[in-house]
Image (cartoon, coloured by chain):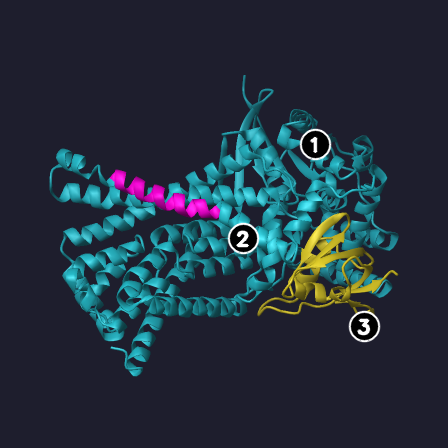
Chain colours: A cyan, B yellow
Amino acid sequence: MKVRKLTIALAGNANVGKSVIFNFLTGLHQHIGNWPGKTVEKAEGTLYFKGYLIDIVDLPGIYSLSAFSLEELISREYIAFEKPDVVINVVDASVLERNLFFTLQLMELEAPMILALNQVDIATKKGIEINHEKLEKILGISVVPTVAVKGTGVYDLLEKAVEVAEKGGATPARIEYGKEIEEQIENLAKLIEETEPRYPARWTAIKLLEKDEEVENEIRSKAPEILEASRNLARKIEAVHGHSCSTVVTSERYETARHIANRVQKIMPRVKPTLTERIHELTTHSVLGYLTMVGVLLLVFGPIFTFGGFVSEYLGGFLYSLEPTLQEILGVGIVKELIWGGIIEGVIAGITVALPYIAPFYLALYLLEDSGYLSRIAFLMDAVMHKIGLHGKAFIPVMLSFGCNVPACLGCRIMETERERLLAIFVVTLVPCAAVTVVVLGLVGRFLGVQWALALYITDLAIVFMLGRIAFKALPGEPTGLIMEMHEYRIPHFKTVISQTWFRLSEFIKMALPLIVFSSLVIRLVEILGYWEQIVTFMYPITVGWLGLRPEMGIPLLFGVLRKELTLIMLATLLGPNLATLTTSQMIVFAFVVMLYIPCVATIAALVRETGWRKAAFITVFEVLFALLVGGAAFRILALLGVP
Amino acid sequence: MDRQDRRVGAPLTALKAGETAVIVSIGSNPQRGRWGRGRVFAKRLMDMGLTPGTEVTVVKSAPFRGPVEILVRGSRLALGRGMAERILVEKTK
């Protein structure tokens, strides 16, 4: 028997339990990557059900289908052009009205769909009861109540989805707008029908009235007269309503959502605040909220830093203890040097970062996000983060980056728009991580005193702060402040959190490891072939001429690309007892450059994953040049000040 | 953006905790980007349910001129200060 194939897409707002349903359905058969050519994450998985091989695509969590964010654009293009057999719209039953606003837009896209009315348990706790049969009748699509975290209703959901696919899709009911708008939509749709549009004609008409730029551009190239007509109609509507046409359409859609929600739900007001509400009160309180936050963060990330450092060292020690065994097998020579020093040391560097730091950081981040606490932290920290041009949500990645830039970079995924993500990533890669702190303390702190180290640290943070602000102004795109839903607190679904951690971790390792191994191989090869001399000479104008360092100090800087702590280790090895004879200026300039220059290889890998090759290369090159600029300036300023 | 109603109403940030008001209009973006046209701002707010005529209740503000917590359409939102200042509302007693 031939296996029949089906594609099901999951769509819905953020934090409605979409990923829990996704995990429930696909289990271990999932793959997390990026949408082709984009830096938006794409989660895909498969399962067998009733003789079907079903491909499940988890679309990004979004609130609308306009073209303003990449996630929204990707979602609507996927649904309209790739035409999945069924779209499962996952809806949070406890916030029905807002969720239906999105449902209505999916219906306008005329996709075959069913509705998963999820988190009915949370709705019940809030005193909301929903008549799902009535909702089914109004929308004209199947509605299945589910509690995904318990698996309740998920089987029914899948059954219904397959049923709809077998019928060749059920067309949802048409949602009508107010009379004047409805007339204009009809008129426009008729015109558009003739141009064979890529999207459904009615949907295109609505989007034209909403002045959706992408749809406008498409129509302009096909039939500019239609665009003209729609602009005229929009002006008419604006004259009647006194608001922009896009406002009018959005308002009406929300009104429809409100009507439907009011017809199907009964709300029993609670007399006593629920437990989750009380936790919300505490965690957003203007004094207690901050205290709680410090406590929680220490509790969650404290052990990770200590534990991570311990495991990292232990793992490293263990892996290095294997060297003699390898030497016995391969003997001493170029082959051993290359295999050990190049490949295996690269792998060690990868493993000692990935396992002890990235895995627990991911885990903690997802736990915080899934429970709802992350949004409360963002609420408390928004004002502070605003000063560097970021907003509240960026607090966690920036905080993480003081430990390790790699998970921090990956954690920037929680930022909503591409612009915000890029800004946060940029700032994060500039923050001195634990390894850099070790170098500053071990060199400047040890030989010049803690006050110098502290001054260096403060100057560095001031520079990061400044660069953040400049990037905020210079980056294209419209900055938006914080607009964030603070969903009800809930207990995170551990299985989902763990599988999310696992699949993202393995994907990162797959990507980062070759890069790490390759670069350590190159550096080792240079060493074996005895090219250091030439490189030192080559770097002379920069190291000595521009930065005022000693010529051999260029070598540790190159090694630092692998891991920042190597800069200090190499420096100590190269200079030996002469380390103490470095001048104050040399130490400070060296530490400065280490703080700011190239992110380590693992961070570059994270950058590539989150921003793509071009932006990653740009950030890397920029930071190297900037570090040299600052280092050179520091050298000259220190000389002027008469510091030896 | 909106031609009428421009001067009516007070900013959302003028409301005290616990007060309820109706949105009159949404002003333009306080921080236009270099290439932005100020449309993302209003559109995003409206997509989150903050359309003219909607009732909003202010729950509280975060300290240090932080975001405002509001209840709108049965859900809880946090709005950055700059955004909240551009939402004009009229009190409903």
Q: Are marks 1 and 2 in contact (CB under 8 Å)?
A: no
Q: Amino acid at mark 2?
A: Val
Secondary element type, mark 2: helix
Q: Main secondary structure of the magenta part?
A: helix
Please tell me how crowded label 1 is: few (under 14), some (14-19), or many (20+) other residues with Cα within 10 Å: many
The answer to whether A84 is drawn above or below residue A379 in the figure is: above
Q: Closer to the camera: disc 1 or disc 3? A: 3
Report which quarter residue A119 is drawn in.
top right
Who is closer to the viewer here, A310 or A560?
A: A310
Please tell me how crowded label 3 is: few (under 14), some (14-19), or many (20+) other residues with Cα within 10 Å: few
Q: Closer to the camera: disc 2 or disc 3? A: 2
Residue A538: x and y in percent read 20, 67
Q: Amino acid at mark 3?
A: Arg
**Residue A434 appears left or right of B39:** left
Badge 1 and badge 3 in a common chain: no
Please tell me how crowded label 2 is: few (under 14), some (14-19), or many (20+) other residues with Cα within 10 Å: few
Between disc 1 and disc 2, whose residue precedes?
1
Q: Amino acid at mark 1?
A: Gly
Residue occupying image coordinates x 63% and y 27%: A151
**Residue B86 appears left or right of A518:** right
Which stretch did the figure color magenta? Answer: A301-319
Who is closer to the viewer here, B22 or A140?
A: B22
Residue A250: x and y in percent read 76, 54
Who is closer to the viewer here, A256 or A283?
A: A283
Secondary element type, mark 3: loop
Badge 1 and badge 2 in a common chain: yes
Check the picture and name the quadrant holding the C terminus of chain A: bottom left
The answer to whether A518 is drawn above or below residue A143 in the figure is: below
Who is closer to the viewer here, A431 or A215?
A: A431
Mark 3 lies on residue: B7
Specify the farthest residue to the left.
A332
